[in-house]
Amino acid sequence: MRVLITGGAGFIGSHLADAYLHRGDEVFVIDDLSTGTFENIQHLKTNPRFRYTIDTVHNQPVTAELVDQCDVVFHLAAAVGVKLIVESPVRTIETNVRGTEVLLAIANKKKKKVLVASTSEVYGLSTEVPFREDGNLVMGATTKGRWSYACSKAIDEFLALAYWRERKLPTIIVRLFNTVGPRQTGQYGMVIPTFVKQALAGRPLTVYGDGEQRRCFGYVGDIVEALIKLMDRPEAVGQVFNIGSNEEITILDLAKRVKELTKSASEIVFVPYDEAYEEGFEDMPRRIPDITKIKELVGFHPQMDLDGILQTVIEYQSGRPSNQRLT
């Protein structure tokens, strides 16, 4: 099979490329390197079944040629990270909405199957945990820049599902919950690589708010395996799936666990949200997925626990080879 991955030089995209090449497929990647990095795919350059294009999916002729050459498309190209979203809302909205619009229109011409990566952010301020795919999405006010990302990804979902219902373009939506592992950067606000980097350097671990917000962290290898299984299942078309772990931890306890595993003497400091991001910044107290739906379809079950995930990130940040599976 020939697979196109938009945003393929990103954290998740590069692991997905690894997995498909390991399976024996051909992989095509397009990435403008705005948040991805060439280092993530450097090791694949010599593989004759791997090809990459440094460009944006907004470049319609280039994207159209790549879509024509491939059998299926994973649309992972997007603005990522709370820090980037708050600081660059125009870029966030344009990247997410316009990129998806261009890709779906091109894919529709040849009816190529498309998996669109969405996010747990779309659940917004909902308190109906664990979050179900058919649950209500509760968006914050438009005056809060943080919600521009959630709204833009929700529009992506609506558009992809509309293409399926109206034009019979086979589309699949996945809502990813805090995917973590080697190659992820803390540059745009991702908490685990940020904590690990701070702990290894002996700097204070910065916990935003009171640290009592609870999150679930899924291992990138588990998530990539689920993505591939969904793409292989015809029954997944026209559906929305949560993918992630349901092992909860508070951010404060996460910081303490990172300290323990790194044997770091770093202190933990609390930073108000207004200081970390913007005045009036809103966060959700809990974000936990209901993963019943994907379990029933493809047998998905997270294999790596939180300590295992943290260990892979620590080893990666330390420059040591990991003993854990990457894909």
Image (tube, rainbow, N blue to C red):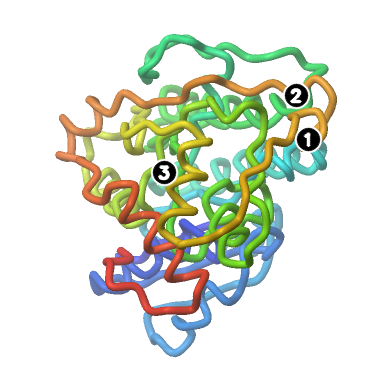
In terms of depth relative to the viewer, which is nearer, 326 or 8? 326
* Residue in view at x 49 percent, y 30 percent: 120
Instruction: Please say if the residues under marks 1 and 2 sit with CB atoms less than 8 Å apart.
Output: yes
Q: Which mark is residue 25?
A: none
Crowding at mark 1 (Cα within 10 Å: few <14, some 14-19, many 20+): many
**Position above or below: 83 against 237:** below
Q: Quadrant of residue 111?
A: top left
Relative side of 197 to 92, left or right: left
Closer to the N terminus: mark 3 or mark 2? 3
Q: Position of residue 23 (x, y in %)?
A: 23, 70
Q: Is residue 64 visible?
A: no
**Position above or below: 21 against 222:** below
In terms of depth relative to the viewer, which is nearer, 80 or 219? 219
Closer to the N terminus: mark 3 or mark 1? 3
Q: Secondary structure at mark 3?
A: strand
Mark 2 highlights which residue?
Answer: 281
**Position above or below: 66 against 92:** below
Q: Position of residue 217 (x, y in %)?
A: 41, 42
* Residue in view at x 34 percent, y 53 percent: 224
Q: Secondary structure at mark 1?
A: loop
Mark 1 highlights which residue?
Answer: 277
As measured in the structure, the alpha-carbon distance from the residue carrying label 3 to the one carrying label 2 is: 31 Å
As measured in the structure, the alpha-carbon distance from the residue carrying label 1 to the one carrying label 2 is: 7 Å
Crowding at mark 3 (Cα within 10 Å: few <14, some 14-19, many 20+): many
Instruction: Please say if the residues under marks 3 and 1 sit with CB atoms less than 8 Å apart.
Output: no
* Residue in view at x 57 percent, y 11 percent: 138
Q: Position of residue 183 (x, y in %)?
A: 50, 65
Q: Position of residue 162 (x, y in %)?
A: 49, 24
Instruction: Please say if the residues under marks 3 and 2 sit with CB atoms less than 8 Å apart.
Output: no
Mark 3 highlights which residue?
Answer: 115
